[in-house]
Amino acid sequence: MSIELRLALVFGLLGLATVAGLVWRARTGKAKAVVGGQVIDLAEIGAIKNGQPVTKFGQKVTFLQFSSEYCTACRQTARLYGELEQVHPEILHIEVDITNRVDLANKFNILQTPTTLVLDSHGRVTSRIGGAVQQQTIEHEIGTFEI
Amino acid sequence: MSDSTEQTPAGIDPRGPRFGAAITSVLLLITVFLALDPATLGAAFAVLLVVTASFVIGAFFGNSKHPYGFLFKKLVRPRLAAPKELEDPRPPKFAQLVGLLVAGTGVVLYLAGVTGALVFAAGAAFIAAFLNAAFAFCLGCQIYVGLQRIGLIKKF
């Protein structure tokens, strides 16, 4: 194979990987509206916060974050929600580790972690965010709810 | 529920594994270039062997024992500001294990006489390493749950 063709293939691979990365970055962490979403059963998902089972949804909105063990972005995302919880007392962040809960991964069709389900005050899923979340996305989601 | 959060190991600088991934992606791109010509296929195999060995260290001993981790600590980290937050060392270890499986498959198939497989293994591993280095793509975040759902990973 000629050196020109080899170089073209190598740079083609580099270009392909770059495009894949840009597409991934543009799509990750975006909220998608869910129409007719189900109501979350807090007992079923085993929601625990500060060592206590969670029995009530957030006053305005609940961010239910599914995480797994080998997930760097989950830690960053959890920290971000935690910070916003300090500023917005009307929101609740719940993190559920699905490393040992394949049933939940199947039920909610989770393919990547973190995946966040945005719930209204009755616990109904209104949107879904795949991947690491940006602060402005969360604040926009909070803004779409009325108390 | 998993009690793994209670045993979370000490955090590492998240830029360490990404620095290592940058070196790995350069080596894998060289591997692809060399593997495209039969005259240099042997050299491609040698480079892929080095990359595979580095994945073995990364997957079983972690970034702190890794030569790239050592380079990062000695040469790169002193020139950078302190990291905003430390990262769990387990996700990069998982990514190294996936890299080992992909690159290792290329090595085994090459030794078995399927020499054409080498360029595909190197190319696939390159894409993952490059996405990690350039875009902070986290393989464990993307595929762990999926692998578990199709039953390829079982936790006991």
Image: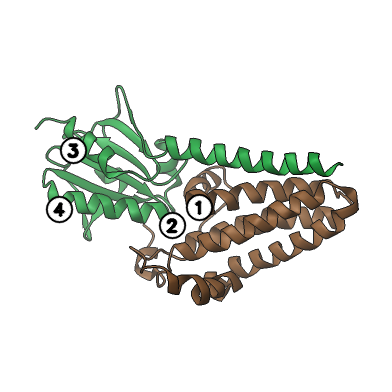
Chain colours: A green, B brown
- Marks 2, 4: nearer the viewer: 4
How far is mark 1 from mark 4, CA to CA?
Answer: 29 Å
Tell me the residue at 53%/52% (across/down): B132
Q: Earlier in the sequence, mark 2 or mark 4?
A: 2
How far is mark 2 from mark 3, CA to CA?
Answer: 26 Å
Subunit under mark 2 = A
Which residue corresponds to mark 1? B140
SS at mark 3 in the image:
strand
Tell me the residue at 40%/50% (across/down): A98
Which residue corresponds to mark 3? A61
Is residue B12 depicted above or below A79 in this figure? below
Which residue corresponds to mark 2? A69
Residue A54 at x, y = what percent?
A: 20, 50
Query: Which residue reaches farthest top?
Result: A35
- For the N terminus of chain A, the image quarter is top right
Front position in the image: A41 or A77: A77
How far is mark 3 from mark 4, CA to CA?
Answer: 14 Å
Whether residue B35 is visible: yes
Residue B99 at x, y = what percent?
A: 63, 56
